[in-house]
Image (cartoon, rainbow, N blue to C red):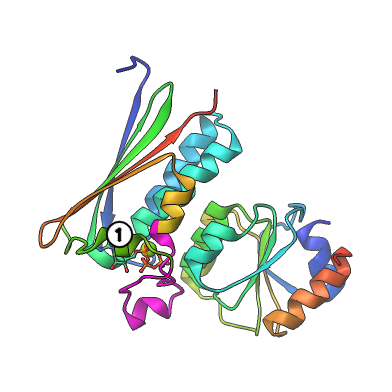
Amino acid sequence: MSSNSLHYHYVVPGDDFTQAGKASSAVKQILKQLGFNPQTIRKMSISLYEGEINMVIHAGGGEIDVDIDDEKITAVLTDRGPGIEDVELAMQDGWSTASEQVRGLGFGAGMGLPNMKKYSDELKIDTEVGKGTTVTIVVKLAS
Amino acid sequence: MKVKEIAEKLGWQIIYGDGEREIEGGIYCCDLLSIVMGRAPSDSLWITVMGNVNAMAVAALADVAGVVVAEGMPFDEDALAGASKGSVTVLRTDQPVFAAALSAAKVLGLK
Ligand SMILES: Nc1ncnc2c1ncn2[C@@H]1O[C@H](COP(=O)(O)OP(=O)(O)OP(=O)(O)O)[C@@H](O)[C@H]1O
Ligand SMILES: [Mg+2]
């Protein structure tokens, strides 16, 4: 482990759509202040936002831990929601179980997980039905 | 061209922001937020009917130059707070999305 590492912790309330995206915005602000390049910031912002929103609309909220060291930014999103039955299916473009209500807000294209895959350097999903989901997003720092 | 200049030229209302950002990513139209998140070019002008707080978060994180709320769709208090938090410039027009994009493209000289 690097000695120069920063940690941030966020609690994400469930089903509060006006708050959704707050943690991602805060992290973006921090990354900007730390002077990371725009591409790195964009990759983390998009991936983290999609993960944050998924916790809100599918899992009743959760928690986010962000670690920044010399080589990478790591975000771990933990929830105690329903879990994902078939991760492979969930990863496919266009697959969504979003309710009519959240579709009305513009969610439910089934592109959140594909975006996370596309914009992160590493994406790991640990999930158990009935227990919850832990999503780990890694964005490497350009050297 | 700056976002505020396009607003002036087309007579579109500026609902929030200073419109100082340059439109350098073209014009992008879509309403489904995760598609916008994944595909909208940064510094683009994003035209949508989604005038809600979540759209403002997407605009800020995808780093578009500005948002145009088309079809005269409503823009509520929460959305305004979101635009303020994300420093997003928001314009509004009664034009439908395609017509709005066409007028903006003409002004920007896009082909
Ligand atoms: N944290 C989670 N807990 C439970 N289910 C989840 C979680 N994240 C994703 N899912 C499931 O995976 C599906 C696909 O997720 P994805 O983010 O790709 O699309 P979406 O959230 O439905 O729509 P979009 O992200 O395009 O607005 C979801 O519809 C949901 O069924
Ligand atoms: Mg999603």
Q: Position of residue B97 (x, y in %)?
A: 68, 80
Q: Nearer the viewer, residue B93 or A52?
A: A52
Instruction: Please tell me which residue is depicted at 80% across the width and 77% down the height of the picture.
Output: B102
Instruction: Please tell me which residue is depicted at 40% across the width and 68% down the height of the picture.
Output: A110
Residue interval drawn in magenta: A94-113
- Relative side of B71 to A4, left or right: right
Q: Position of residue B108 (x, y in %)?
A: 85, 64
The chain carrying label 1 is A
Q: On the rendering, which quadrant does ligand 2 occupy? A: bottom left
Residue A129 colored magenta? no
The quadrant the N terminus of chain B occupies is bottom right
| Residue linked to disc 1 | A88
A40 shown above or below B20: above
Q: Position of residue A92 (x, y in %)?
A: 38, 63
Is residue A142 in sight in this rendering? Answer: yes
The quadrant the C terminus of chain B occupies is bottom right
- Secondary structure of the residue carrying tag 1 is helix
Q: Position of residue A20 (x, y in %)?
A: 37, 60
Is residue B90 in sight in this rendering? Answer: no
Q: Nearer the viewer, residue A115 or A69?
A: A115
Instruction: Please tell me which residue is depicted at 59% across the width and 53% down the height of the picture.
Output: B87
Instruction: Please tell me which residue is depicted at 65% across the width and 55% down the height of the picture.
Output: B41
A5 shown above or below B20: above
Q: Nearer the viewer, residue B26 or A126?
A: A126
Mark 1 residue's CB less than 8 Å from ligand 1: no
A53 shown above or below A27: below
The kind of residue on which mark 1 rests is Glu
Extreme-front residue of the structure: A88
Q: Sort mark 1 into few (<14), some (14-19) or many (20+) by Cα contacts within 10 Å.
A: few
Extreme-top residue of the structure: A3
